[in-house]
Amino acid sequence: MTCEQAKEQYVEEIDMHANGPADLTAADYAGVLNQGTYLASCDVPESSHAQICVAVQNGVAVGVTVSVDPSDPNVELCIARQVRALAFPSHPKMDVARVQF
């Protein structure tokens, strides 16, 4: 599933009486995504630019979209697989994080 599809399908339920965990911040996701070590196994050319969108819920990437310029579908699929394998901070609500390299 792409990041955009996950975002479109997500329905947030708001319970005004529930005391759930505090929302996560962009810095929480940046701590995982900005490291970029997951790109190493994908042989991304240094001249390439990558844009990654990941929808995260309960610590798992439920939707990922990767675009690489210049386009390379094999590299994009590799990066998406690597992002899906990452462990993210867990929260029951879905969040969308974006990063560029």
Image (cartoon, helix red, strand yellow):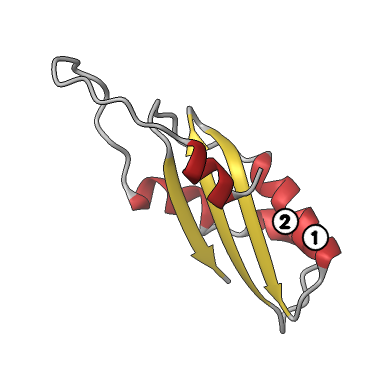
Decide if residue 36 is on the left or right side of residue 47: left
The residue nearer to you, when weighing 44 against 9, is 9
Residue at image x 31%, y 25%? 13
The residue nearer to you, when weighing 69 against 25, is 69
The amino acid at mark 1 is Cys
Residue at image x 80%, y 64%? 75
Residue at image x 75%, y 62%? 76
Rounded to the nearest whole Å, what is the CA distance between mark 1 and mark 2? Answer: 6 Å
Estimate the x, y position of residue 7 in percent, counting from the top left: 48, 44
Decide if residue 30 is on the left or right side of residue 23: right
The residue sitting at the left extreme is 17
Residue at image x 24%, y 31%? 22
The amino acid at mark 2 is Ile
The residue nearer to you, when weighing 36 against 16, is 16
> In which quadrant is the N terminus drawn?
top right
Pointer 1 with pointer 2, Cβ within 8 A: yes
Estimate the x, y position of residue 95 in percent, counting from the top left: 41, 42
Up-down relation of residue 28 to residue 30 (above or below): above
Specify few, some or many for label 1: CA neighbours under 10 Å numbering under 14, 14-19, or 20 or more.
Answer: some
Query: For mark 1, what is the residue?
Result: 42
Decide if residue 12 is on the left or right side of residue 15: right
The residue sitting at the bottom extreme is 47
Q: Quick one: SS at disc 2?
A: helix
Report the disc number at residue 79: 2
Asked which quadrant contains residue 90, the reply is top left
Up-down relation of residue 93 to residue 49 (above or below): above
Between tags 1 and 2, which lies in front?
A: 2
Estimate the x, y position of residue 59 in percent, counting from the top left: 50, 31
Report the disc number at residue 92: none
Q: Quick one: SS at disc 1?
A: helix
